[in-house]
Image: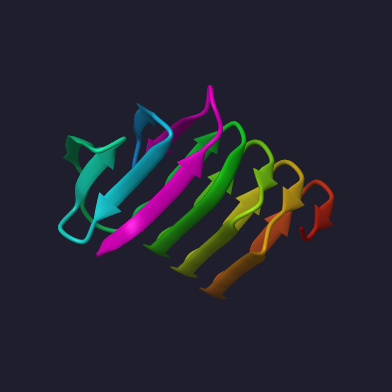
Amino acid sequence: MSIFDIFLKPMTTVTINGKTYSGKNITVTSDGNVIVDGSRHGSVAGPVNVVVHGACESVSTVSGDIQVNGDVNGGDVSTTNGDITVNGNVSANKVKTTNGDIVAKGQIGTR
């Protein structure tokens, strides 16, 4: 089980709790391991706060804020407990937070 998943577009980086990673698929497992394209690249503790630097397909966390500095194309953006900010266009199936705010600064649509 993972507490964070992201599927990225080429040339996109992600900062998780202050550390930056690059890859097409980044996951934080339930025990805090950061997996980038199938390889372990460290670990995190506590809520997973995510900043995406570029476009992505989908982002989801169990707990923590999500900020996307680019477009979201196709998938979902969701967190159970945290805020979502998208500084780009949103063409996603679902943008959802159970306990937090959603701010989208571009056009919003569904695919």
Coordinates of residue 3 in the picture (x, y in percent): 31, 61
x 25%, y 57%: residue: 46
Residue 25 percent coordinates (x, y):
39, 40
Residue 42 falls in image quadrant = top left
| Farthest top residue in view | 11
Q: Indicate whether 30 appears above or below 48.
A: below
Q: Residue at x 30, y 36 (%)?
A: 36
Residue 99 shows up from this direction: no
Q: Closest to the observer: 34 or 81? A: 34
59 w.r.t. 62: above or below? above
- Quarter of the figure that contains the N terminus: bottom left
Residue 16 x/y as whole percent: 36, 41
Magenta stretch, residue numbers: 1-16
Side of 90 relative to 4 (left or right): right
Given residues 74 and 88, the one toward you in this image is 74
Q: Is residue 81 left or right of residue 32?
A: right
Q: Is residue 68 magenta?
A: no
Q: Determine which quarter of the picture holds residue 23.
A: top left
The secondary structure that dominates the magenta segment is strand
Using the rendered image of the protein, determine whether residue 26 is visible from the camera's viewpoint. yes
Indicate left or right for 23 with 44 as reference: right
Residue 11: percent from left, percent from top: 53, 22
Q: Residue at x 58, y 60 (%)?
A: 76
**Quadrant in which the C terminus is drawn:** bottom right
Q: Residue at x 63, y 52 (%)?
A: 85
